[in-house]
């Protein structure tokens, strides 16, 4: 979806402003100047670049907290090979750049607490505002930053005008997102709706959830657990226990509050890809890990050796585990099941193995589907398959010919007007990626079958479209 939005310059999307991510789309458009054909790859690489920035920031802030450069480097390396961080670093997503913003904020926050100045506070507000243009994750620690700023002003460690500078910095950073929100409010004459769209998008129920659990809770819990196939947990516990003594009450409380907010958000956010929202929590856990390493390093030579060994194990073992886990799971009879099987995809490998340099299932599917639907068929696609189909058709001349149903084109909704649907189809062959999302009216009038060696369901019309005659 992001690859298609960047290709077409879609800055808002259709899921509400909270999922618009305009700064990410703008950066992707700049990447497109390098190569339109290679843009999908470039966007995947862009995620890796975002994670690299996040890891560099994390190394800097943990070095600042512990006073040891080796701890900063080791902490960044351990986070780099966690499942969520690696998995999100190789697909077109916004989360790694959100993590880059969060780690920059934490760096500025630590500097601000140690030597308060209005410049640092304004810089923190600016970075957080820019983060809002990338992802609404930036809103989660905002309240903590505001409290810190107010406390510093109230205790006269900062002048009152610092708050005005911070407000200006935030508006400058978040200006693009604010303008989009105001524009939506003006166009729709619905200010409350615009604010709701900016805060929650189309997912208000999930964002505000406190009781519901995800239908994919077990799968997400298993995928989240892969990020702790290391010693981060025990090291973080040591860090949390000793954080107040090492850093002082205010920094420890601030870091603890942000950690708790990030953790609570992901735990009660019931979406199918819940585990992908774990990355900010992993960043906060990494701060505690660094403190834990410092505690062990100061406890004596043997404990220092144990800390180094824990780092080495946490860096080397996860990749080995990711390599072997799919095979071990198959031997144990564990399977990943979904509502429908996706052609060309090994589900176990796709979800467990974080590197994706040879993962081409979406592209292979799209090519095969476009060939099956030639010369002039129409493909009814769902949200999982429509974007690969559109991108492959846009990029590859050989994939063109068939039409992909997208945003009400080329066919109208069948349930509203079957006759208009058939007229727009104009005798062309109709195909579907799956029958699970097709309207009951269409399934009543047409039979969809798929041969074993094909990826699309082919429609055979059984009934003429029913026409409702209005009473005289």
Image (cartoon, rainbow, N blue to C red):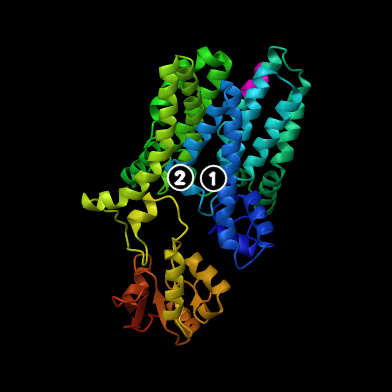
Looking at the rendered structure, the number of numbered marks drawn on it comes to: 2
- The x, y position of residue 392, in whole percent, is 52, 71
Cα gap from disc 2 to disc 1, whole angstroms: 8 Å
Q: Which residues are magenta?
A: 147-151
Q: Is residue 1 above or below residue 219?
A: below
| Secondary element type, mark 2 | helix
- Look at 51% across and 12% down and name the residue there: 245
- Look at 31% across and 48% down and name the residue there: 325
Q: Is residue 468 above or below residue 181?
A: below
Asked if residue 150 is among those painted magenta in the image, a careful observer would answer: yes
- The x, y position of residue 200, in whole percent, is 54, 44
Residue on which disc 2 sits: 276
Residue on which disc 1 sits: 95
| Foreground pick, 270 / 465 | 270
Q: Marks 2 and 1: CB-CB under 8 Å?
A: yes
Asked if residue 354 is among those painted magenta in the image, a careful observer would answer: no
The label number, if any, that marks residue 61 in the structure image: none
SS majority, magenta: helix
Q: Earlier in the sequence, mark 2 or mark 1?
A: 1
User: Residue 70: which quarter of the image?
Assistant: top right
| Secondary element type, mark 1 | helix
Q: Is residue 341 left or right of residue 187?
A: left
């Amino acid at each position: 979806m992001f690859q298609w939005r960047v290709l077409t310059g879609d800055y808002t999307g259709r899921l509400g402003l909270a999922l618009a991510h305009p700064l990410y789309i703008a950066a992707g458009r700049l990447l497109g100047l390098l190569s339109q054909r290679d843009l999908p790859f470039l966007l995947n690489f862009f995620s890796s670049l975002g994670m690299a920035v996040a890891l560099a920031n994390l190394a800097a802030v943990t070095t600042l907290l512990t006073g040891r450069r080796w701890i900063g480097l080791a902490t960044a390396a351990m986070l780099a090979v966690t499942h969520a961080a690696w998995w999100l670093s190789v697909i077109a997503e916004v989360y790694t750049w959100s993590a880059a913003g969060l780690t920059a904020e934490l760096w500025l926050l630590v500097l601000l607490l140690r030597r308060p100045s209005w410049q640092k506070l304004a810089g923190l507000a600016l970075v957080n505002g820019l983060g809002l243009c990338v992802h609404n994750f930036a809103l989660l620690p905002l309240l903590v930053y505001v409290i810190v700023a107010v406390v510093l002003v109230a205790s006269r460690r900062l002048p009152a005008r610092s708050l005005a500078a911070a407000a200006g910095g935030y508006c400058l950073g978040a200006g693009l997102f604010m303008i989009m929100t105001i524009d939506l409010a003006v166009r729709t004459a619905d200010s409350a709706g615009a604010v709701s769209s900016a805060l929650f998008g189309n997912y208000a129920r999930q964002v505000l959830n406190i009781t519901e659990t995800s239908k994919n809770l077990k799968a997400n819990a298993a995928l989240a657990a892969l990020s702790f196939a290391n010693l981060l947990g025990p090291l973080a516990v040591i860090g949390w226990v000793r954080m107040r003594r090492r850093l002082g009450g205010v920094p420890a409380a601030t870091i603890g509050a942000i950690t708790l907010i990030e953790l609570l958000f992901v735990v009660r956010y019931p979406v199918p890809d819940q585990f992908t929202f774990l990355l900010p929590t992993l960043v906060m856990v990494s701060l505690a890990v660094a403190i834990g390493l410092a505690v062990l390093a100061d406890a004596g030579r043997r404990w220092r050796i144990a800390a180094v060994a824990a780092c080495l194990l946490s860096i080397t073992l996860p990749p080995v585990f990711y390599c072997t886990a799919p095979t071990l799971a198959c031997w144990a009879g564990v399977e990943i099941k979904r509502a429908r099987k996706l052609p060309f995809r090994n589900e176990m490998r796709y979800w467990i193995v974080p590197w994706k340099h040879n993962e081409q299932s979406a592209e292979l599917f799209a090519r095969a589907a476009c060939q099956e639907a030639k010369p002039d068929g129409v493909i009814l696609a769902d949200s999982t398959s429509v974007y690969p189909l559109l991108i492959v058709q846009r990029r590859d001349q050989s994939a063109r010919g068939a039409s992909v149903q997208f945003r009400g084109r080329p066919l109208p909704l069948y349930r509203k007007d079957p006759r208009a649907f058939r007229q727009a189809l104009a005798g062309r062959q109709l195909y579907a990626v799956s029958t699970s999302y097709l309207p009951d009216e269409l399934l009543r009038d047409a039979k969809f079958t798929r041969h074993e060696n094909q990826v699309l369901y082919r429609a055979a019309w059984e009934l003429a479209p029913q026409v409702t005659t209005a009473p005289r």
